[in-house]
Amino acid sequence: MADKVRALIESELGRLPAKLKPFIQKIGKDDPDNKIFMTLSFMGYAYGEAFTQLAESALDDWPKKNYIVQPMLYLARHSMELNLKWVISTYQEYLNDYTEKTDHHSLTKLWNTLTTLLLTAGAPTDIDYSKHCLKLLITLAGTTPMASDFGIPTTKMEGHSNWPRSIWRGW
């Protein structure tokens, strides 16, 4: 089955514009220039920047671009997850404490892991900015506990007249 999928992908690669091809090629294990694009910190930054650019564009032409709200929030949420995982891995390495796993998508679990690591390292956790970040995180994570649930319709949308009333789980 994998060979069929690989053959399909390879046959379609020839139809892609040349400028797009570098973005979908597999990164070589020994290619240090390309490895930076797959780090948690870079991907967290990239998703955050994508959110910012989409949000600015949508706000410039609001409310005509309200269709982009869910994808924007997904980018924001994913950026938060990746950045949390990056900071957690940094503190885990610093403390040599790998007891907590980050192979999940729960923002609140990741936040709690980070808070525990920060306390262990002696870093302050009760500063105003930290409280602000937690409020943002809860806004996104409180509506859906897992990334796989985010933005998935649970009822049929019979038309666009329901917008902006939510049809998404937890919203």
Image (spheres, helix red, strand yellow):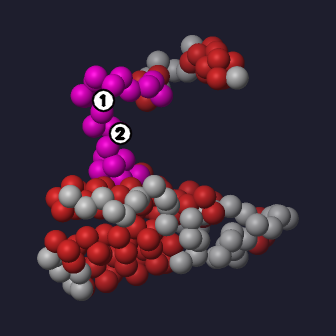
Residue 15, placed above or below residue 40:
above
Q: Are marks 2 and 1 in contact (CB under 8 Å)?
A: yes
Q: Quadrant of the C terminus?
A: bottom right
The dot on residue 86 is: none
Give the side of residue 123 with respect to residue 80, left or right. Answer: left
| Magenta residues (range) | 24-49
Q: Position of residue 6 (x, y in %)?
A: 61, 20
Dominant secondary structure of the residues highlighted in magenta in the image? helix
* Residue 103 vertical position relative to residue 9 in the rendered view, above or below: below
Residue drawn at the location 28% of the way across and 22% of the way down: 30
Is 41 left or right of 158, judged from the image as shown? left
Q: Which residue is mark 2?
A: 38
* 151, 5: nearer the viewer: 5
Q: Say if residue 38 shows up in the picture.
A: yes
In percent of width and height, residue 139 lies at: 49, 78
Q: Position of residue 79 (x, y in %)?
A: 40, 58
Q: Residue furthest right?
A: 158
Crowd around label 2: few <14 · some 14–19 · many ≥20 (10 Å): few
Nearer-the-camera pick, 50 or 93? 93
Residue 28 on the magenta segment: yes
Q: How many marks?
A: 2
The residue under label 1 is 34
Amino acid at dot 2: Met
